Amino acid sequence: MASLTVPAEVPSVAEDCEQLRSAFKDLLKELDRELTHDFEKLVLIWTLDPSERDAYLAKEATKRWTKSNFVLVEIACTRSPKELVLAREAYHARNKKSLEEDVAYHTTGDHRKLLVPLVSSYRYGGDEVDLRLAKAESKVLHEKISDKAYSDDEVIRILATRSKAQLNATLNHYKDEYGEDILKQLEDEDEFVALLRATIKGLVYPEHYFVEVLRDAINRRGTEEDHLSRVIATRAEVDLKTIANEYQKRDSIPLGRAITKDTGGDYENMLVALLGQEEE
Amino acid sequence: MASLTVPAEVPSVAEDCEQLRSAFKDLLKELDRELTHDFEKLVLIWTLDPSERDAYLAKEATKRWTKSNFVLVEIACTRSPKELVLAREAYHARNKKSLEEDVAYHTTGDHRKLLVPLVSSYRYGGDEVDLRLAKAESKVLHEKISDKAYSDDEVIRILATRSKAQLNATLNHYKDEYGEDILKQLEDEDEFVALLRATIKGLVYPEHYFVEVLRDAINRRGTEEDHLSRVIATRAEVDLKTIANEYQKRDSIPLGRAITKDTGGDYENMLVALLGQEEE
């Protein structure tokens, strides 16, 4: 039995055309709205000052949880310690709550155990490194990670409290002493392990972290505009040039071209403007 | 057999006197040095600006641990959220480390679980209160405290992240709903329970907290000068008048008189000066 039916009164070609035209018109309106929405969101986050922007992004992340916990990790780990404090201050003013309060309230278990100290941290920002400590703590990390004790108290203490310079020294020693890259050992499909990876990358290799987010956002079917907008808006005038260079090294296509292939209209123009001139 | 012996050659009265005089002289020198030490320490902490002072006091506390964990609680809970952030900033500059880094490194178990989020907190400072939340969280606190689950994740989350105004509403509801004062339920002789008491008092009833520290410091044999100096120097020009009034209500003796009875010299004079004029 045919599943298609013909109306009792067959419409004229003109009527068909009109119906198709109006259906497409609605579709285009939707598409247009969608594009405008991406553009408007990008304008919104770009026009905020950096601490306001981080407070806004963090709040958006706390509305979705799980799926966007890594945005919290990104804000907590890739900003300077002082920038994070200013973002927390802006979060108070916008939400009448503290960031750690919302994070702690809405998470449990290992996620809470990692996220709360990360967003609460005010790390020392200097370059001094204690090599004896780097050695001792790389040993601790190696033991725990090799045992897959990913959420161990000591792992979280080290990652959540040590300065970025100190962590860099610790991870260098890790590689030298144990011949393994800690990130390679964190490739399980587990969501918590993915957060731990993002934590380490965000703290010690922020450009690589951002390249990974951009590749993921651009290469996905349909593009993840939120992630694309967030990275471009927050890194423009910070380290976006370096990120674009790393991107091109990694994907053999300039970041600008990858973006224009996947976006359009005002949204595309603004992303490209934020990216600035690049060598192609 | 007598335990006292007489020298073969008995000294003359003049010789005895000379020996006694020089022994007393040394004793007085010691006493004098002791007094000067207290005076100097008081001058030192008084002349620092408040955030530098807190950074100094916190560092001193991290050198002794256990015995002085409550000084960390005091700094984390009785200062305004912004003052705590400034103290953490000053701590970086003095120690090339973060406060939470030192606290997390030197503590374990329940103490770490409570102290790290307390010193890392940047609470919302506004007066807004969510009564529905106060009700829900007073229930959680009552269940956990009644079960003696003092270091439960939820107890620590509530105390370490909620604003002071919100905690005040929660504890008021606690008293109204359950007819019990949470502080009365925290009178075990356990050191962790004492820290939890100090946390709650410091956050919600800071003047009572300081009166308790002062009474303890003054009434102890020999006086605990460190605690006395710390409270007087950090609360002068903040809320020392209120604290002195509470002290007199509680002990029926003006704080100034209690202090002059137990101290002397420049140290006494400076404490009294910091205390300002009081009604006697």
Image: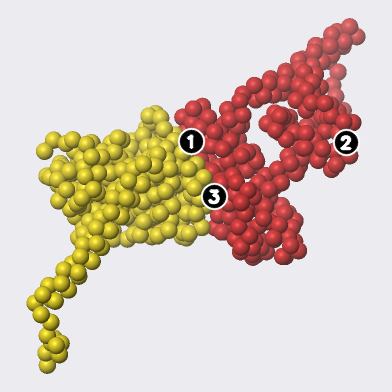
Chain colours: A red, B yellow
Q: Residues within 10 Å of mark 3 (few under 14, many from 20)?
A: some
Q: Distance between the residues labelled 1 and 3?
A: 26 Å
What residue is shown at x 60% (from left), y 46% (from top)?
A126
Task: Tell if the residue under mark 2 belongs to the same chain as the one under mark 3.
Answer: no
Q: Where is residue A179 in the image (x, y as percent from the top left)?
A: 76, 63
Camera sees residue B70: yes
Q: Position of residue A19 (x, y in %)?
A: 82, 11
Q: In the orientation shown, which residue stands out farthest toward the left?
A: B13
Q: Is mark 3 on a helix, strand or loop?
A: loop
For disc 3, the marked residue is B96
Quarter of the figure with the C terminus of chain B: top left
Q: Which of marks 1 and 2 is nearer the N terminus?
A: 1
Q: Position of residue A219 (x, y in %)?
A: 81, 37
Task: Out of B179 and A68, give the one closest to the viewer.
Answer: A68
Q: How far apart are marks 2 and 3 (CA)?
A: 42 Å
Q: How far apart are marks 1 and 2 (CA)?
A: 41 Å
| Residue A98: assigned label | 1
What residue is shown at x 40% (from left), y 45% (from top)?
B54
Amino acid type indicated by mark 1: Ser
The answer to the question of whether label 2 and label 3 lie on touching residues, with beta carbons closer than 8 A, is no
What residue is shown at x 61% (from left), y 25% (from top)?
A49
Amino acid type indicated by mark 2: Ile
For disc 2, the marked residue is A253
Identify the chain of the residue marked 2, using the numbered disc in the image.
A
- The answer to whether B83 appears left or right of B185 in the picture is right
Camera sees residue A1: no
Quarter of the figure with the N terminus of chain B: bottom left
Residue A234 falls in image quadrant: top right
Identify the chain of the residue marked 3, using the numbered disc in the image.
B
Amino acid type indicated by mark 3: Lys
